[in-house]
Amino acid sequence: MTSVDEAGPEAFARVLAALTDPQRHAVDSPSPAVCVQAGAGSGKTRVLTLRVARRIQDGSAEADHSVVVTFTRKAAGELRQRLSRFGLRVAMPSTTGGPPGPGVRAGTLHQLALTLLRRHALDAGQPPPLVADYRFRLVSEIVGDPAVASAVAAEIGWAKARCLTPDSYRTAALAAERSPTIAADRVAEHFRSYQDSLARRRALDLDDLVVRAADLVLDDTTFAEGVRWRYRHLSVDEFQDINPAQYRLIEALMGDRCDLLAVGDPNQAIYGWNGADPGLITRLPTLVADMEVIRLDENHRSTPQVVAAASAALGSAVHGVPQATGPAGPMPVVTAYDDETAEAEGVASRLLHELESGRGWSDQAVLARTNDQLSVISSALKRAGIPFRIAPPPEAQPGTRPDGSGAEEDAVELATFHRAKGLEWGSVCVVGIEDGYVPIVHATGEAARHEERRLLYVALTRASVQLHCSWARSRRTSGGRRVDREPSPWLAAVARVSRTGSGRIGPVDAGRRIAEIRAGLRN
């Protein structure tokens, strides 16, 4: 009996017929263990969901024993929608620990870990775990100073991602050349107090869920047998973002059965600062027996000109050479402005020009390395009357509206490089590409600088057609002092495959320009 309904096969066949040969190979490969190293714009999520559907259709996998995980609720929701579109029954993660409903389980890795913990508690007649998702607030109560609390909370997250304890943190942090704003000994002390506070509340934070779930599977043989029977076929999206604690859980779930689909892009590994292991996806074939590696290097999103600029930013650090398949587009533009105000006014002018050319506000974005850089842009857009919204954090609750200049749905997106990952727009302005921001000033080690370079690549590949890059020769600090700036050391390579823009753009006459544009659109 198939797990695909009558309407699903039509959608499945239609999407399958449009695949390229490499994509089709990734979907059809008979290997139970496959690592798909898929570049930006290569259709990796489509390939992942099609492969899951194909295996269920041909009987090489069962829907009720298949689980697909990713890292954010938004991405998990997209996976569920795509799987449902192909007619697959999709089960939501259990909220009680009881038996899951029929169909493919699709959710975040943290949801899966919580499901396992609840199941174990139910079997043992114990209360389910209490989840504390307010780390910063709890650390702030312990530390007092918000700035110190932020640094400590970040270090605790990194430590737990690496399966460290308060006792083992200091040595590991020094070996990894971590550079928090406070001493490692103090971080370890606050880390211990934080764990004690969780214990008093009988609570686990999100990172603890992953560690404890892996502990249960590895330590309880009876529980492990049931879990591995239930979750026989594992698929992991965005595998380049996996950290050691998460991989330990995946290994525990696999046991001796190497049935794993790992999909990710080594060139978009940008969370090493947060504990991820950026090299794991390239080492994976040496860790999983008989794993087949399939590369998807064709970018179906961006023009050859955008792909060339993004590849130039990566330089020799590139894993595979991305290739564009679409028609040619305009040359990217690299512009140097006198200061951050001129840059912001220039960006506003470009956004207006794109609107006049027929591109909607919501098909445009402005990306920066830090939120502080975006605040200058947002002020200029307000003066110009340009509707915008600030991209919410990846795990913002559904229904919450990001900050912006109004409630209009058609609005320019403002986002940091990290928050822009996974998104795309027709026209993108990447601003503030200066040394000290790109790479960020505290990225001093070789690994950190490589990650910063990949982060720039992520930002540039968000554009499908129009790409505008800029930097400012001077910028005012948060303390009000004006300092001279230099372009990012990686911008020269981008400039060689781009044209030079004019930095002499005057202030935007907001009322007149907006009125003219809107009047023109009505005619």
Image (cartoon, grey):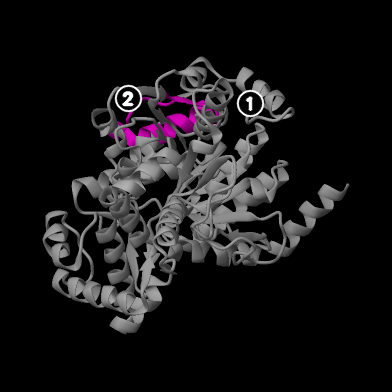
Q: Is residue 323 above or below residue 143?
A: above
Mark 1: amino acid: Met
Q: Residue furthest top?
A: 21
Q: In the rendered structure, which segment of residues is drawn in magenta?
A: 296-322
Q: Is residue 447 located in the magenta-colored stretch of the structure? A: no
Residue beneath the point at 43% across and 31% down: 39
Q: Position of residue 330 (x, y in %)?
A: 56, 31
On the picture, is 394 further left or further right than 217? right
Q: 182 and 404: which one is in front?
A: 182
Return the residue at label 2.
291
Return the residue at label 1.
1
Q: Is residue 318 located in the magenta-colored stretch of the structure? A: yes
Q: 268 and 106: which one is in front?
A: 106
Q: Is residue 131 above or below residue 70?
A: below
On the picture, is 175 further left or further right than 117? left
Q: Position of residue 473 (x, y in %)?
A: 38, 56
Q: Position of residue 406 (x, y in %)?
A: 69, 66
